[in-house]
Image (cartoon, rainbow, N blue to C red):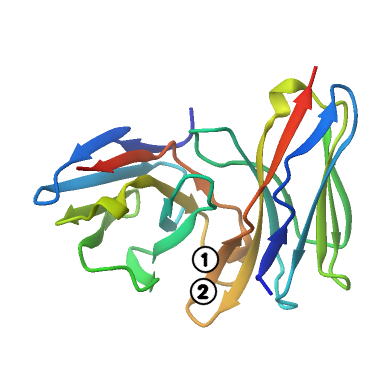
Amino acid sequence: DTEVTQTPKHLVMGMTNKKSLKCEQHMGHRAMYWYKQKAKKPPELMFVYSYEKLSINESVPSRFSPECPNSSLLNLHLHALQPEDSALYLCASSQGMIGIRGNQPQHFGDGTRLSIL
Amino acid sequence: QKEVEQNSGPLSVPEGAIASLNCTYSDRGSQSFFWYRQYSGKSPELIMSIYSNGDKEDGRFTAQLNKASQYVSLLIRDSQPSDSATYLCAVNRLQEYGNKLVFGAGTILRVKS
């Protein structure tokens, strides 16, 4: 078990559906991240929130919409996804992302395995 | 040249041997280096972090950093079958809006009993 909790663990959705992935951490971390990982590939960064503000968007398609309601929660809203979006979606958190706090390690949740029909 | 490079393996070692995993990086400004272990179908798990040149030991794991050579390695002593996994090297990239973690492609380790 990790200190970063992601729900749901598995999600199957059609291309016209709208769904959300949720992530929660209670370690007092101020930076939270969304990654996408395809089979046999390393995690690819999608979004970074620092102090509840979007700091980095790695040119992710608009069908993925992140939200950070507070310092403990991170959501990823999904709409009109494509089959190639099927992957493991990982949430991570760290103490910070700027300056010396940015050197702190990121801790990952167990991920949501997403399948698009 | 990839920003973080690892030999994809698989690296096969017998049980009880030392497994040596290597990683090179291209950004000389990088300050933080991490090793993650990832079992098949699971999420990455942090096993070591290192920030200064030299060795850092934690149990059976030793991380080694040489910033001049832009090289970081992970040694696993007394390798066990349960160590069989993909090991991801990750390096912090400094950029304008904050640090970003860049992963290598990972090295598959197989420990044979």
Front-lying residue, A7 or A103:
A7
Residue A108, how many percent across, how many down?
49, 44
Q: Residue furthest left?
A: A16
Amino acid type of the residue tagged 2 in the rendering:
Gly
Mark 2, other Cα within 10 Å: few <14 / some 14–19 / many ≥20 = some
Residue under label 1: A97
Disc 1 to disc 2: CB gap under 8 Å: yes
| Residue A87 seen | yes
Residue A76, how many percent across, how many down?
26, 53
Chain containing mark 1: A
* Secondary element at tag 1: loop
Front-lying residue, A33 or B82:
B82
Amino acid type of the residue tagged 1 in the rendering:
Met
Report whether B65 appears left or right of A76: right
How many numbered markers are drawn?
A: 2
Residue B41 bears which disc, if any? none
Mark 1, other Cα within 10 Å: few <14 / some 14–19 / many ≥20 = many
Report whether A33 appears left or right of A77: right
Residue B98 bears which disc, if any? 2
Residue B104: quarter of image: bottom right
Front-lying residue, B71 or A107:
B71
Residue A52, how many percent across, how many down?
33, 63
| Residue A50 seen | no
Q: Residue furthest top?
A: B113
> What whole-number distance in Å separates the C-alpha atoms at marks 1 and 2?
6 Å
The quadrant of the picture occupied by the C terminus of chain A is top left
Q: Does residue B8 sit above or below B82 in this rendering?
A: below
Chain containing mark 2: B
Residue B26, how many percent across, how many down?
72, 74
**Share a chain, discs 1 and 2?**
no
* Secondary element at tag 2: strand
Q: Residue at x 41, y 48 (%)?
A: A91
